[in-house]
Amino acid sequence: MADDRYDIVVHGGTVLDGICDAPYAADIGIVDDRVVAIGDLGDAHASRRVSAVGMRVAPGFIDIHTHSDISITFHQPMVSMISQGVTTQVTGNCSLCLGLATSSETFAFEQSWLDAHGARICWTDLDGHLKYVREIGCGTNYVMLAGHGTIRKRVMGMADRYADRHEIEAMKRELVVALEQGAWGISTGLEYTPSGCANLEELVALSSVVRRYGGFYATHLRNEGDALLEAVAEALAVGEQARVAVQLSHHKAEGRRNWGKVHETIKMVDAARQRGVDVEMDQYPYTAFMTNLATQILPPWAVRGSNDEVLARLQDPTTRQGIAAEVRDRYPDLEDDSTESPWELIEIGVARGLRSLQGRTVASLAREQRRSAVDVALDLVVHESNFLSAINHGIGAEDVRYVMQHPLTMIGSDAVGTGPEGKTGDDPVHPRCYGTFPRVLGRYVREAGVITEAEAIKKMTVLPATRLGLTDRGKLAPGAYADIVVYDPNRVEDTATYEEPHRVATGIQTVLTNGRITWDAGAWTGALPGRVLRRGL
Ligand SMILES: [Zn+2]
């Protein structure tokens, strides 16, 4: 077809299109933002030819679980995302949604994340946020979930109690507006305040609204450790009662004594699917998680309410004693000769005040100071005014493999999009920000053979596209958007570590979003072709 003209031809590669299980040799012809031809385009005219000889050509990765709404105001290229092949990301997860925050005092916590980068919340609703993102641009396509916690704060502030009938109605109205403005569903973060103040009735009421709009319910479970099974049962109950599609976020079992429980949770998922509940899940391929230290270790009642209330409890001697006793139950103090203490697994992540402690384990600090590990941890929370995250190496390696092998597990980074240049490069982030997708393809596919390459690509493309209801992304076919990643299946791997997280992966050669190249030869091209995708529009 020598007469055909293409803007770009990706030639000489083997294609894994997200649909077929076997890779096949083909060129991809692109006009404007769409794939228009797949086949032998050797003679065709092209304004630009991208060589994929020796490479794999796949649909751009859809990251079903990110927090990049936190960083979009100060980092539009999303270098950590495009450098691993991501072309679409779903933001607003774990109940937190910057798009529904406002500049009012109620959202001082959300604003505090932006302050460090000189950014401001300058919108009052989802529509305003999405218009703003469209104006400033983004390296990837941008999808947003309505955060349950953020909606709750709009209606009830940080009220630490069940919502009454009127408040539930008010939240439903807020949710309807967000869904009409293009939100793709709702996210909960039931381990956090205020999302965790909701009971089943509230979750079902809101999820029923989401179902009417064809959206889904993404849930960071109420508990991912000792009470994991009960928490999964609750998520499935929401799915069953609201007849809404359920996405179990970053699925895992935290804490050595809970390892293996994912065998039970997956049985529950399979059984629920038999009953007609549309439940799927996502995971990141790491054996450590990273969240606020207080949320990890304190009993739920102690982290309820505002930040000031949490700190006040830790500063009141009697209350603190009670908290410490409960923490000790789950995280016993160090024994002299034990290396099995959970405190050995907890490492300081982001500490704005005591930066020198970043990377140290609580156990090592306790030994050095000859103090109780529980006291050291609680003091750190107070010292850092609760702006303290920790890396907890508390996920079983076997569990990660087991969850990955389930056919309905997608890959989601749970990351905030970031970049190594400038101020963002100083943020001590989790290595999954840069490494999630290459790590699956390198370590889990090529090296360990946990899943096949075709299975991995489905988990990164077709599965999340189907969950979202995107019919023209997540696959390579004529008519689909030209979201494409070209990678070297023999070299692709993550290089980011907990010590040096801002390292881009190797083996990702070229990435295109909406027909424009965002990542090439190890660098951002300067393009911001990502689009704001609104559900139903
Ligand atoms: Zn989460």
Image: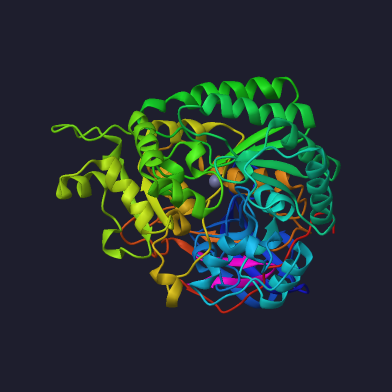
Report whether 7 appears left or right of 79: right
Numbered circles on residues, count: 0
Residue 511 lies in the magenta-colored region: yes
- Residue range corresponding to the magenta coloring: 509-521
In front of the other: 454 or 502: 502
Quadrant of the image occupied by residue 22: top right
Q: Is residue 483 visible?
A: no
Report whether 226 appears left or right of 257: right
In front of the other: 43 or 472: 472
Q: Quadrant of the C terminus?
A: bottom right
Name the residue located 61 percent from the left edge and 77 percent from the top edge: 527
Report whether 218 appears left or right of 511: right
Q: Is residue 458 above or below residue 420?
A: above
Q: Position of residue 485 (x, y in %)?
A: 57, 60
Q: Is residue 522 above or below residue 164?
A: below
Name the residue located 69 percent from the left edge and 54 percent from the top edge: 476
In front of the other: 299 or 84: 299
Main SS category, magenta section:
strand
Residue 247 lies in the magenta-colored region: no
Q: How is the image coloured?
A: rainbow
Q: Position of residue 362 (x, y in %)?
A: 27, 46
Report whether 118 appears left or right of 95: left
Q: Is residue 91 above or below residue 120?
A: above
Q: Position of residue 332 (x, y in %)?
A: 29, 32
Quadrant of the image occupied by residue 77: bottom right
In front of the other: 303 or 407: 303
Name the residue located 58 percent from the left edge and 29 percent from the top edge: 231
Q: Position of residue 103 (x, y in %)?
A: 66, 69
Q: Is residue 416 visible?
A: yes
Name the residue located 59 percent from the left edge and 28 percent from the top edge: 232
Q: Quadrant of the N terminus?
A: bottom right
